[in-house]
Image: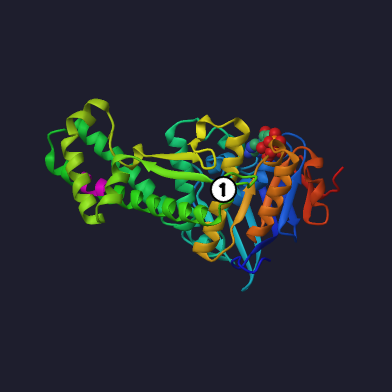
Amino acid sequence: MPSNSPPASRIARLMLQDFRTYASLDLAVSRPLVALVGENGAGKTNVLEAISLFMPGRGLRRAELAEMARNGGPGSFAVSLTLDTPYGEHRLGTGIEQPGEGVRSSRTCRIDGASVSSPTVFAEFLRLVWLTPDLDALFRGPAGDRRRFLDRFVLAVDAEHGARVNALERALRSRNRILEESPDNRSWLDAIEREVAELGIAVAAARRETVARLAALILETREEASAFPFATLSLDGEIDHLVTTLPAVDAEDRYRAILRESRPRDRAAGRTLIGPQATDLLVRHGPKDIPANTASTGEQKALLIGLVLAHARLVGRMSGLAPFVLLDEIAAHLDPRRRTALFDALESLGGQVWMTGADPSLFAELQGRADLLHVTAGHIEPSNPA
Ligand SMILES: Nc1ncnc2c1ncn2[C@@H]1O[C@H](COP(=O)(O)OP(=O)(O)OP(=O)(O)O)[C@@H](O)[C@H]1O
């Protein structure tokens, strides 16, 4: 492990029960790099998704938990990890129990056999960062995708962020409903707007802090000639401007005043137009100094990887835990020079990295450096690259 890396934990064993394609899987791994290779539909991404459930939220596919229970199975599923940490071995488990008559299945979370209230508690043991192919269009797509991407960045360093974002969404829904159904009820509107302002400023401030830290780390570590160009980041939104220019209490007061003034406009629009729900994360290709969405497809991919690598370093620094990195179908899109650079960069993070790919030759250079695993429907075996 590089000397400047935070302490690393590794998944030593992964067990799946009735999870998607897997009726029962008991997989032992030992290296910091793990590559899952297999045909399309073999179940590689399913493994990454299972690991991603140890971060608060709905995992890397944003699927409903019930969808993850194996078709034809009992309706429940379990995912369990044995983590080797510098402070000993721990067992983390999550899943859903079998739904009863008229009762929805509920999520379970366990640490060393004891139930814990929510997946947020897993953050004490592991942090996760991931990159999936559906993010390839991130810089060209809608602002909402970039907000969600950013919120996951924030969540990896601040485990409470997800709960605040959800609470804000609920409060905004309530305000929109009151505006529609009882627009003259000032006391209700005042009360809900107080809540929206408090949560909105907290969400915007957490985003701003993460972006500022990430930008500082990128500035410190950037190399003009790197295989993964550095990104220049900024936040675009009225509330983001408020939290940059005003102390939190004043920003909250100002946002409340904005909400009050915007009632007629928001009512007509059927939604709250100003707030962190309208923020965009602006990304520029640093070395070329152009907006990311005008860079070539390959340049955008390299930029995105550079951003995720920088974020993984930030998570390590801030949490004191080298993060687990999940990379779905990453190597296929890179030229050989970038692929080698990526593997080297991943090793230098000091955490454990789980990658997938359909072509074994993509990982050939990792022979002896990685656990190379062959995935077929419902099974995983050690493999040798072609
Ligand atoms: N709840 C479920 N029960 C059983 N099988 C499922 C369930 N959900 C998804 N699957 C199956 O899992 C398979 C997809 O697995 P996965 O996405 O992990 O494949 P992959 O190896 O990553 O493929 P690719 O290389 O195409 O990305 C599909 O065949 C799908 O039908």
Residue 329 at x, y = what percent? 68, 39
Where ligand 1 lies, by image quadrant? top right
For residue 298, side relative to residue 233 (left or right):
right
- Can residue 333 be spotted in the picture? yes
Q: Nearer the viewer, residue 207 or 60?
A: 207
Quarter holding the C terminus? top right
- Residue lying at 60% horizontally and 31% vertically, measured from the top left: 297
- Residue lying at 24% horizontally and 38% vertically, measured from the top left: 175
Quarter holding the N terminus? bottom right
- What colour scheme does the image use? rainbow
Q: Check if residue 363 falls in the magenta segment.
A: no
The residue tagged 1 is 308
Label 1 C-beta lies within 8 Å of the nearest ligand 1 atom: no
- Residue lying at 75% horizontally and 41% vertically, measured from the top left: 336
Residue 371 at x, y = what percent? 78, 54
Q: Amino acid at mark 1?
A: Val
For residue 201, side relative to residue 140 (left or right):
left
Q: Nearer the viewer, residue 223 or 148?
A: 223
Residue 295 at x, y = what percent? 55, 32
- Can residue 139 be spotted in the picture? no
For residue 204, side relative to residue 20 (left or right):
left
**Which residue of the protein is positioned furthest toward the top in this rendering?**
268
Numbered disc 1: secondary structure: helix
- Residue lying at 51% horizontally and 60% vertically, measured from the top left: 123
For residue 222, side relative to residue 27 (left or right):
left
- The residue range painted magenta reads 192-197
**Residue 200, relative to residue 176: is it above or below?**
below
Q: Main secondary structure of the magenta part?
A: helix
**Residue 280, relative to residue 111: is it above or below?**
above
Q: Nearer the viewer, residue 198 or 107?
A: 198
Splitting the image into 4 quarters, where does residue 385 fall? top right
Splitting the image into 4 quarters, where does residue 262 fall? top left
